[in-house]
Image: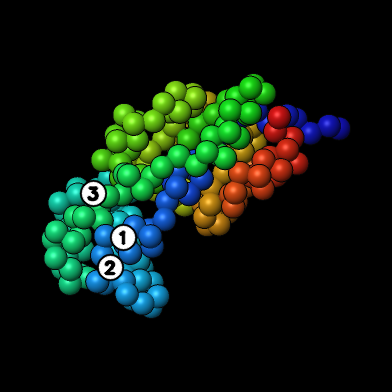
Amino acid sequence: MSRPMIRRVIFDLGGVVLRWRPAVLLAQQLPRHTATPQALAQLQAGFFGPDWWDFDRGTVSTVDLADRLVRRLALGVPEVLSVIEAGPEELQPVEATLALMRRLREAGCRLYYLSNMPLPYAEHLERRHDFFRWFEDGVFSSRVQCIKPEPRIFELALERFGCAPQEAVFLDDHPLNVEAARALGLHAVQFRDAAQAEAELQALGVT
């Protein structure tokens, strides 16, 4: 029996559709604290850890996040805010992924997004980028107050998109998110670059 054609593709945003380089962001904004690879790695783990996940979840504001990070990382308020406020400009479109999205749309696929994203960033992106019109719908973590890889955010997304797990394929750069999607019955591809993702989509029967 032939495999059913998959025509719904759900994209992660940061690291897939949009550039996201936290180490570069920290090095640009806080050069004094990132002078060695070890210092950069340590700061990245602390800055984009559990406190940031709550920012993604929408349960802390920018001010609250800054307060937490200042106290925990021994940084100044202006230093912390410089990183948080520079984040939206780091999230630039990846042209190869946009080209893939265009090809999928031309082939009749229906596009969606599912992204861990703080609310100020989400609002900035929606205002800034026309490609959001290509998506039929999408879920930002900060608007539903749960984050990947928690199963609930996938369940909410599928309910909102009106599709069963086996009818869609999910693209994400983080292996834990891919594993969580597969555990719920979604087809899932770990994104490394647009060419690799497109080849895997074609192997799944996405046209």
Q: Are marks 2 and 1 in contact (CB under 8 Å)?
A: yes
155 horizontally vs 103: left or right: left
Quadrant holding the C terminus:
top right
Q: Position of residue 184 (x, y in %)?
A: 57, 45
For disc 3, the marked residue is 85
Circle nearer the viewer, 3 or 2: 2
- The answer to whether one can see residue 69 in this image is yes
Snapshot colouring: rainbow
Of residues 79 and 145, the one nearer the viewer is 79
Q: Position of residue 99 (x, y in %)?
A: 58, 33
Q: Are marks 3 and 2 in contact (CB under 8 Å)?
A: no
Q: Say whether marks 1 and 3 touch (CB < 8 Å).
A: no
Number of the label disc, if any, that sits on residue 28: 1
Q: Which mark is residue 110?
A: none
> Which labelled disc corresponds to residue 31?
2
Residue type at numbered disc 3: Glu
Q: CA distance from mark 2 to mark 1?
A: 6 Å
Residue under the image location 54 percent in, 48 percent down: 172
User: Mark 1 to mark 3: distance in Å?
Assistant: 13 Å
192 shown above or below 100: below
